[in-house]
Amino acid sequence: MKIAGTSELLIKAFRYFSLPFHYPRHFIRIAILTLLNRSLVRELFRLHPHKAWYKGRGFKTIIDIGANTGSFAFAMRMIFPDAQIFAFEPIPDCYQQLVHNLSSYGNFKAFQTAIGSHSGTIGFHQSEFLESSSVLPMGKMHKEAFPYTSGSKIVQVPIARLSEFQNKMTIEPPTLLKIDVQGYEDHVISGAKNILKEIEWITMEVSYQPLYEGQMLFNEIFSLMASKGFIYQGSQDMLTSPLDGSILQSDALFKRKK
């Protein structure tokens, strides 16, 4: 087991350090970040096996809901150097880091707000592991599977409907909407309204087990998206429980009907 584990680590390390060669336009930048800021490169590393799929869609506009510090936006920038990216993040420290990480590339605009089905302010459960933060309280299963995420505090953050930003974004098709909001996906969709008509593809983190209190699971999300005119097209990657190996989450792809 020790040998197998060492081999896996070596393979992963090789894949990380070979990553810059796949993006020659940004070779030096990715090489430096791989050494000094690997958390920013992490999503590019994870999504690289799907690079051909993303390139094949030719996205010119990318809307990133739940951007955190910008790892997904960074990955999209490497794959689509000229695309317009709009990112939304409510946690102040994450938002500042997001702006720092992406602004120098241009064609990027960030908004410091949560996205949901109403406007105002809302109590936000900020996890010690920031990527697990959510409007919804964390569920027991999540805490048991990932105890390092269980500590949290409630902070007040602004919240708004995505539709309110329609006139603040220049949307050129084809457009990708990415939603990673830890169980709050249905609220984001409910507040999107007419803007969904301008979206060709949605990649959304969906759950198969209840990780947050009151969240919709995949079957309900599937039905919701169908009612909005989107067809499920499969999933990329899966998160499994370290306790029993059960599938907890994946990134589901939805395509708008023509």
Image: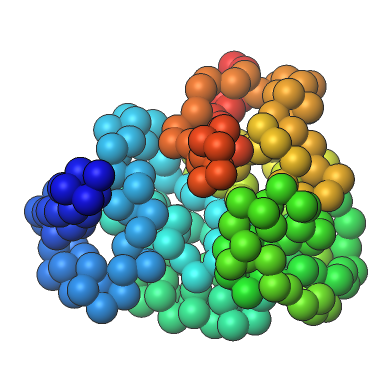
- Eyeballing the image, is 151 above or below 195? below
Residue 9 visible, this orientation: yes
- At a point 42% along the width and 45% down the height, the residue shown is 60
Residue 202 visible, this orientation: no
Tell whether 67 sits left or right of 183: left
Q: Position of residue 251 (x, y in %)?
A: 53, 37
Q: Position of residue 120 (x, y in %)?
A: 89, 69
- Eyeballing the image, is 105 above or below 172? below
Q: Quadrant of the N terminus?
A: top left
Q: Nearer the viewer, residue 70 or 128?
A: 128
Q: Where is residue 125 in the image (x, y as percent from the top left)?
A: 77, 68
- At a point 81% along the width and 76% down the height, the residue shown is 154
Q: Position of residue 20 (x, y in %)?
A: 15, 58
- At a point 55% along the width and 37% down the height, the residue shown is 244
Q: Quadrant of the C terminus?
A: top right
Quadrant hosting residue 119: bottom right
- Eyeballing the image, is 119 above or below 35? above
Tell whether 60 sits left or right of 249: left
Q: Which of 109 and 223 is in front in this view?
A: 223
